[in-house]
Image (cartoon, rainbow, N blue to C red):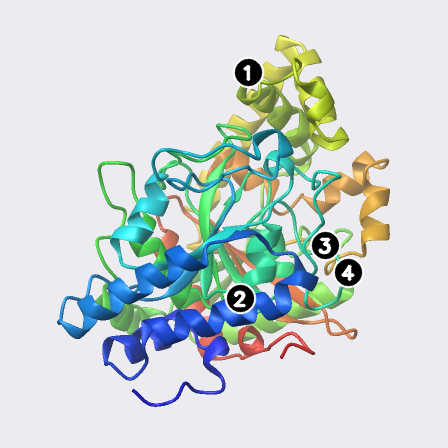
Amino acid sequence: MSSLPRDLPDFEIYDLSLQIRSGKISPVEVTRAILTRVEALDAKLHSYARVTPELALKQAEQAEKEIQAGDVRSPLHGIPLAVKDLFDTKGIVTAGGMPIHAQRVPTENATVVQRLQDAGSVMLGKLQMTEGAFAIHHPTIPDPVNPWGAAHWCGASSSGCGVATAARLCYGTLGSDTGGSVRFPSAANNLTGLKTTYGTISRKGTMELAASLDHVGPMARSARDVLLLLAIIGGHDTQRLLATIDEQRFDNFLKGFKGLRIGLDEAWISDGVDPVIQRAIQQVKVILAEAGGEIKSIKVPDTRATSSNWEHHCGVQTAVAHQATYPDKAGEYGPALARLIDQGRELKAVDYERIIRDAQQFTREMDAVFTEVDAVLAPVQPYAAPTYEQLAGLASDPEANRRLIQFTSPFNASGHPALSVPIGFTGQGLPVGGQLIGRKYQDDLLCMVGMILQRHSDWHRQVPPGLA
């Protein structure tokens, strides 16, 4: 095989897969190159909770032998990936960002991890995350560092996923999203990430934060790569969401994109939203319209109740998820997660019922919106990734905190799929994320709309400055 391309770390999964399957690039050589990169860069970035080089090389060697023998399992065969540290991995510690679980070694893989393994992918390791998948990292664990700006937030709980994928320390990953934790790190790190339709991806073997709000979702550097990952992991434990990538369907979609209805609520996306975000959304609107989309003015249901309710909604379910260790081992918890659980334990049943009814009402109203349009265009958050100093102020300001999650958390409550996509940069060079929200069970359509956008823009191809 020829020497590896200099831009190998920047390859998208799709392109790398073609090279591997054609025999032009060796899975073993790729894996060694990325492991070397992890060793060189991650001491400063802290994106990995643990690296598994021996397993990765063993899987890469097996993939290479199978591909050379003509036995190609999937487009992910031989592709180096990593997963968030809340997905069970057989024989490998899965701690969920919690020192209390530092010695927890599962005896079997989570369903989604097993599907990646069955597809022939290479697992580089487990990616760092906030404590228990809530908002803040445990005080004893260093925060991953945003490669676009070390002083800036790298997103919520799937933080290591965002940093590792942006820094080219893996080609793609699986995260989880309970209030925005796939979409926030995707926006902060200039990635594409999908919060899937609730219930369409198995959560078996996935550490729970809030059962009715938790969603598993793929993250990568393009919408096409997200769709590839979705095709592998999708579906319940006994069935698939997508058996494979239907290339013909995408070709037909490109021809039929004209007339696809994209909804835009101008009032909603401008209320307290930074002008740079508003301008970026308008650029996307123009691109999609010129590509043949029909832009329709819509009214999104009021998101204030669902976003205001989110922390209490999550807290009650988190208290249930942690009842085996909390409050008995409360002293081993960080303050943010402990506070969330305490709030959940104290909430009155009548107040929780009101939260549930608000969520149900919002879901019905949002379903009605999708009788008018095929997708809704919105920001991921009202401003680009805040500094950690700005973020600290949110804890004491409930309204500011609500505004941060107003475009993400309502769709965890409603279960609609939502795709975060890069849509530009601030004057300081920070990435800006936009969001496509879709009809339930049309996750692949959102990915294809994202692919249309990325055919007509190059924001998603930009690399963080200063990376070797």
Q: Amino acid at mark 1?
A: Ala
Q: Give residue 75's quadrant in the image.
A: bottom left
Residue shown at 53% from the left, 43% from the top? 177
Q: Amino acid at mark 3?
A: Pro
What is the CA distance from the residue labelled 1 to the residue labelled 4? Answer: 43 Å
Check disc 3: other Cα within 10 Å, few if <14, some if 14-19, many if 20+.
many
Q: How far across and down, in percent of the image, does residue 34 sit?
A: 48, 70
Viewer-side label of 4, 2: 2
Q: Is residue 378 visible?
A: no
**Number of on-image labels:** 4
Residue under circle 2? Answer: 169
Residue shown at 22% from the left, 40% from the top? 239
Residue shown at 48% from the left, 45% from the top? 369
Name the quadrant of the N terminus: bottom left
Residue 336 lies left or right of residue 421; in this view the side is right
Give the camera-side residue of 152 and 20.
20
Disc 4 to disc 3: CB gap under 8 Å: yes
Task: Please say if 31 is above or below 143.
Answer: below
Residue under circle 4? Answer: 274
What is the CA distance from the residue labelled 1 to the residue labelled 2? Answer: 35 Å
Give the camera-side residue of 122 and 148.
122
Residue under circle 1? Answer: 324
Give the camera-side residue of 440 and 230.
230
Viewer-side label of 1, 4: 1
Q: Amino acid at mark 4?
A: Asp
What is the CA distance from the residue labelled 3 to the residue labelled 1? Answer: 37 Å
Residue under circle 3? Answer: 382
Q: Secondary structure at mark 2?
A: loop
Viewer-side label of 3, 1: 1
- Disc number placed over residue 417 in the picture, else none: none
Disc 1 to disc 4: CB gap under 8 Å: no
Q: Secondary structure at mark 3?
A: loop
